[in-house]
């Protein structure tokens, strides 16, 4: 192979993870190519351009902590940044660090195979380029592989269809149209209020209602921003030493919901509701462990829905009956209020699923709901989907998808036995989506950077987990999940939103414990990993 396709590392994806990984590898003096399917940087924030797309983590915390200059130079404008603002931020970082020169855009990795004799990976792209690399690092994101449900008649529908995770770059004008929205997860909760303001009619098809808490979004006061910037080092340190990766939120609860009386519980819930955001689920320390405690929070949100939605029967249908938090809780702006509009209709699919799309609409229980456009707000093949869509082959030609047929197997969510020098950033078996993602990403990137530096310093050819360490880790992740209420409903955490996908709880609750375990493994000479000792000559 020629020099221009022979590099130290290939990174797949140019979102938060890929950009920081590239910057970190450059810091080691290594050559690196980033392969990105989009036409620009941003990852999930490049593709998710649907109306109302925002992060559910406050913008002052949803940013890199590794570079003080970037933190000082960039100024967020809203409490919860919109997709365009987050994309501009990542474009700013890429320009500030001159990253784009090592990124190949509009290109997908289609396969990667270990060359065992050379201890290298051979990566093939959709333009038939072959790249040889020592390290292959998946920065593909946890929520980047769009999940389009298999519904009969999709090709028969006469109007346009859209998926919120693959939104047209130029936007969509729904003025005067009847719009069907399938799904009521986060992207639907964010987009439906804005679509309803524009469209003539909106028909929402709901299989399972979602818990949503208000964002109370607002412009950021410049004085507040400057105060946080001055205190950023403490915020970052606190964030990296908490269970969720947040540094500036309300204080962590010290008591359980059942340890206080009803008046005090109500006061705390009122306070958290008024503050807004995901911190509501942190009102008490037992909400995800004790069913009776969880019921108190769920009841509170159901009461709020009943207060907001004028029609009692509609409020009932919008009220989840499941454990609060077992699905990703949504952060909304005017979602429940939208159902008070005359041009918004809810179709409940819990008893009768969608039968088919016809030329003119969506058929449910023999009734065709006429519409002009369909929005699939049906989420993602989470955690593993973007990796599974690449044909990755390890030792002996073993396909990663085959190894993961019964559920993902990893050690620390970072590596897989029989796949040497393959790393995953926020992979299954790590806290990932249960944390502030940027904090989780930075922790993973820095761990990978450090082990790669060790390998180059000591001329080590390969690293991969021991089979026993991998098996023990998977058992540990399952055991931790069983202690919680996350298994209390079907969710994309478990992969149940994708037909045929194994039901396995994929993320690991508890960022701080996880981080400490990673540090201990590294301090013990990378316990549970095995190194190949002779790095082959380039």
Image (cartoon, rainbow, N blue to C red):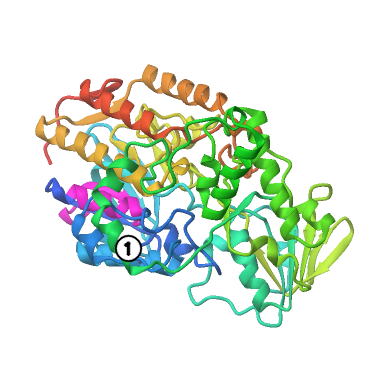
Q: Position of residue 466 (x, y in %)?
A: 33, 20
Is residue 138 in view? no
The residue located at (63%, 35%) in the rendering is: 294
Residue stretch in magenta: 1-25
Placement of 285 over or under 275, stated as above or below: above
Q: Position of residue 477 (x, y in %)?
A: 47, 26
Direction top: furthest residue: 468
Q: Quadrant of the C terminus?
A: top left
Is 209 in front, or is 48? 209
Is 124 in front, or is 467? 467
Placement of 526 over or under 313, stated as above or below: above
Q: Secondary structure at mark 1?
A: helix
The residue located at (21%, 34%) in the rendering is: 451
Direction bottom: furthest residue: 176
In magenta stretch: residue 13 = yes
Judging by the rendered image, the residue that carries numbered circle 1 is 225
Is 223 in front, or is 459? 223
Q: Position of residue 22 (x, y in %)?
A: 24, 52
Direction right: furthest residue: 366
């Amino acid at each position: 192979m020629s020099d221009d396709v022979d590099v130290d590392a290939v990174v797949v994806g140019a979102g938060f993870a890929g950009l920081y990984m590239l910057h970190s590898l450059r810091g080691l003096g290594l050559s690196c190519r980033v392969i990105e399917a989009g036409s620009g940087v941003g990852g999930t924030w490049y593709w998710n351009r649907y109306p109302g797309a925002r992060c559910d983590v406050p913008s002052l915390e949803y940013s890199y902590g590794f570079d003080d200059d970037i933190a000082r130079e960039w100024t967020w404008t809203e409490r919860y940044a919109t997709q365009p603002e987050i994309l501009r931020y990542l474009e700013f970082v890429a320009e500030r660090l001159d990253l784009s020169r090592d990124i190949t855009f509009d290109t997908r990795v289609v396969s990667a195979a270990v060359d065992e004799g050379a201890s290298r990976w051979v990566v093939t792209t959709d333009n038939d380029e072959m790249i040889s690399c020592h390290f292959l690092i998946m920065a593909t994101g946890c929520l980047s592989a769009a999940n389009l449900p298999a519904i009969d008649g999709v090709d028969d529908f006469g109007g346009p269809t859209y998926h919120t995770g693959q939104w047209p770059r130029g936007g969509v004008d729904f003025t005067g149209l009847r719009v069907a929205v399938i799904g009521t997860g986060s992207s639907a909760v964010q987009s439906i209020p804005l679509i309803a303001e524009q469209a003539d009619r909106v028909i929402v098809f709901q299989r399972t209602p979602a818990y949503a808490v208000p964002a109370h979004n607002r412009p950021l006061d410049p004085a507040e921003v400057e105060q946080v910037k001055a205190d950023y080092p403490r915020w970052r340190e606190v964030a990296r030493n908490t269970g969720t990766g947040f540094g500036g939120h309300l204080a962590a609860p010290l008591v359980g919901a059942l340890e206080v009386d009803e008046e005090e519980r109500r006061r705390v819930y009122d306070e958290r509701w008024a503050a807004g955001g995901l911190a509501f689920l942190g009102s008490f320390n037992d909400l995800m462990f004790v069913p009776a405690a969880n019921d108190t929070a769920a009841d509170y949100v159901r009461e709020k829905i009943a207060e907001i939605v004028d029609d009692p029967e509609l409020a009932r249908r919008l009220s989840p009956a499941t454990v609060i938090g077992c699905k990703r809780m949504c952060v909304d702006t005017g979602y429940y209020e939208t159902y008070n509009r005359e041009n918004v209709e809810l179709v409940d699919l819990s008893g009768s699923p969608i039968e088919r799309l016809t030329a003119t609409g969506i058929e449910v229980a023999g009734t065709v709901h006429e519409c002009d456009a369909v929005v699939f707000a049906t989420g993602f093949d989470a955690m593993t989907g973007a990796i599974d869509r690449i044909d990755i082959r390890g030792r002996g030609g073993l396909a990663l998808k085959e190894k993961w047929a019964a559920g993902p197997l990893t050690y620390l969510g970072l590596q897989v036995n029989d796949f040497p020098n393959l790393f995953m950033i926020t992979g299954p078996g790590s806290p990932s989506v249960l944390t502030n993602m940027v904090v989780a990403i930075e922790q993973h990137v820095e761990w990978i950077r450090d082990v790669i530096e060790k390998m180059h310093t000591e001329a080590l050819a390969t690293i991969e987990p021991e089979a026993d360490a991998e098996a023990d880790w998977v058992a540990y992740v399952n055991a931790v999940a069983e202690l919680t209420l996350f298994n209390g409903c079907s969710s994309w955490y478990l992969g149940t939103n994708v037909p045929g996908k194994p039901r396995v709880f994929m993320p690991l609750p508890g960022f701080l414990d996880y981080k400490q375990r990673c540090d201990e493994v590294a301090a013990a000479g990378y316990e549970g990993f095995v190194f190949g000792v002779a790095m082959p000559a380039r």
